[in-house]
Image (tube, rainbow, N blue to C red):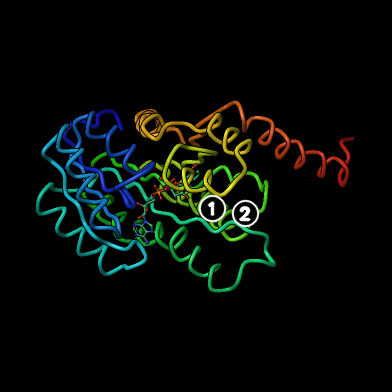
Amino acid sequence: MKDLNGKTVFITGGSTGLGFGMATAFANAGMNIAITDIRDEELATAKEKLNAITDKVLTFNVDSTDKGAIESAADELEKSFGPLHVLCNNAGIPGGAPILETDDDRWRLVFEVNFFGPLNGINTFLPRMLEHGEEAHIVNTASFSGIHGHGHQSAYGSSKFAVVGMSEFLRNDLADTNVGVSVLCPHVADTPIIQNLKKRVSQDMAKVISDMAVPAETVGNQVMNAILTDEFYVFCDGTHTRSMLETRCNDYIAAMDRQFPKA
Ligand SMILES: NC(=O)c1ccc[n+]([C@@H]2O[C@H](COP(=O)([O-])OP(=O)(O)OC[C@H]3O[C@@H](n4cnc5c(N)ncnc54)[C@H](O)[C@@H]3O)[C@@H](O)[C@H]2O)c1
């Protein structure tokens, strides 16, 4: 997309953290903002803060796993703001523990929110974006845990690998259309999820996490830049994650070289 001013964005899980960082960046760029969440109080607080930037803010208490509710929100949003241009499938929940310590119900819930939530957003809004034909963009929030399998992320990391994979296929589907795609892959961003994590770890580890954490508003601006430059992978830091990315790419090539040595 070339210009965001006056366009409309829908952000799931937008009342706090990265979703709110995106909402702030988009509001500053002159967009009409629609955010969803499942917590009324946080939605009201977010609306109040965003209203300091713009009065074009709608909030919806919508669970991203509820297709019918997303569809209704889409209809209501269009009545107020017209067609949607940017969809940010951002709502997500944690679920990291070794596989044998993660029960089936947790796996299903994590996939329901982190994978099927974005899929619901795509199935609701993409046909409308293709139909209106104006420049549009979809951003799926994955994680660096969906790029490189580090630590013990079991259900969470697996759901985020699925989001990265789905986004790659979506990009293929949408080549030569009016809709661009990006996948957001933060490593550590300073949001309530991370603030809660810091309370559960040692002081030393909490400091390591704090040192790595990127502010949510910075991530919001990174997402906005990715839309404006049509960048697919959005990495939020190039310091703590670079060697993991190199290891993964090198591992692929090394395995292929062992199995099929170059002549
Ligand atoms: N913070 C990080 O370091 C980090 C790193 C990688 C990926 N992420 C991803 O970024 C996204 C946002 O996370 P965050 O760190 O801002 O956390 P957050 O908890 O601040 O924000 C998530 C928001 O989503 C809402 N939510 C949860 N389930 C929902 C549902 N079913 N429907 C609608 N809303 C729902 C929550 O109420 C919350 O407001 C998540 O997908 C998360 O996995 C975060």
* As drawn, 220 above or below 77: above
x, y percent for residue 185:
51, 41
* As drawn, 214 above or below 163: above
Residue 178 appears in view:
no
Horizontal side of residue 198 vs 71, given as left or right? right
Horizontal side of residue 167 vs 117, given as left or right? right
Which residue is nearer to you in this view: 259 or 74? Answer: 74
Q: Nearer the viewer, mark 1 or mark 2?
A: 2
Which residue is nearer to you in this view: 130 or 51? Answer: 51
- Asked where in the image residue 36 lies, by quadrant, the reply is bottom left
Q: Disc 2 residue type?
A: Gln
x, y percent for residue 60:
21, 57
x, y percent for residue 192:
42, 45
* Residue that carries the numbered disc 2 in the rendered image: 153
Count of all numbered marks drawn on residues in the image: 2
Q: Residue at x 33, y 45 (%)?
A: 16
Q: Disc 1 residue type?
A: Lys
User: What element does badge 1 sit on?
Assistant: helix
> Sequence-wise, which precedes: disc 1 or disc 2?
2
Dot label at residue 160? 1
User: What element does badge 2 sit on?
Assistant: loop
Q: Residue at x 13, y 48 (%)?
A: 82
- Quarter of the rendering occupied by the C terminus: top right
Q: Are marks 1 and 2 in contact (CB under 8 Å)?
A: yes
x, y percent for residue 42:
27, 51
Which residue is nearer to you in this view: 86 or 55? Answer: 55
The span from disc 1 to disc 2 (Cα, nearest Å) is 10 Å
Residue 3 appears in view:
yes
